[in-house]
Amino acid sequence: MYNKMKKLILFLLICNCSSSYSQDSLYVGKSFVLPEVRYPVCISWGEEWAEKQFQEEYSSVFDSISQFLKSNNKIKFEIRFYTDSRGSDSANLVLSQRNADDWYSRLVKRGVDSSQLKSIGFGESTPRTVWVKDNIYYLDKSKDVQALPVVLTEHYINTFRKTDKRRYEMLHQLNRREELVITSIEK
């Protein structure tokens, strides 16, 4: 719960969801990392219970993001989901598309214009690039740090499977991500 709230607060600070961006700060290709949403796995208690728990836990996340999207309604976005490389390529593609479609549906139900959004699941096909210096991983290339780019391919991550289980898990986690990407801006 704490990490989810921390990510939501970070998203709200980055997006300044209470008002529209200036035209200078928004551009095609700009990407916002969405807060990670954990979907419930509930077979014995039924779908209704799982959905109720999900709504209680994530309602504020979807409300804040839909407010941001509605206040920037001249901008078109893609909701992009990526998985790690565990499981088959086809299963990961289906999973990421299902999750992207779920975000799309939840945002449209909250009043976001459906023509403003497109959902795309990439599965494991697009590994994240990070920057590394002294075994510290950076998500963005910092001007202050002379770090080397590393693409988090399955081969790279698997080099840590037996030698550094913590890093192995962290790198898989970095590849699992949700993004909101600007695809066009109407003048």
Image (cartoon, helix red, strand yellow):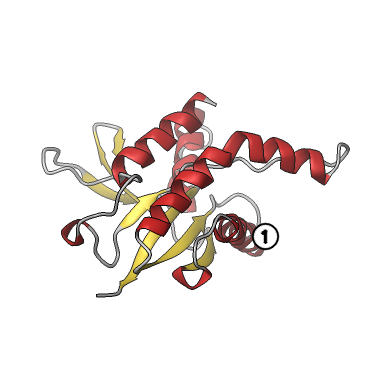
Up/down of 65 relative to 185, above or below: above
**Residue at image mark 1:** 91
Q: Is residue 158 visible?
A: no
Inspect the image, locate mark 1, and give the three-letter code of the amino acid beneath it: Ala
Front residue of 61/44: it is 61
Q: Residue 142 in the image: state x and y as whole percent.
A: 17, 42
Near mark 1 (Cα within 10 A), the count class, few <14, some 14-19 or many ≥20, is: some
Q: Which quarter of the rendering shows the C terminus?
A: bottom left
Q: Is residue 150 visible?
A: yes
> From the viewer's perspective, is 2 left or right of 54?
left
Q: State the residue lying farthest toward the left.
A: 144
For the point 51% across and 45% down, which residue is it? 63
Q: Residue 48 in the image: state x and y as whole percent.
A: 81, 43
Front residue of 82/155: it is 82
Q: Residue 50 in the image: state x and y as whole percent.
A: 76, 40
> From the viewer's perspective, is 80 left or right of 53?
left
Up/down of 77 relative to 15, above or below: below
For the point 73% across and 43% down, which residue is it? 51
Q: Residue 21 in the image: state x and y as whole percent.
A: 25, 54
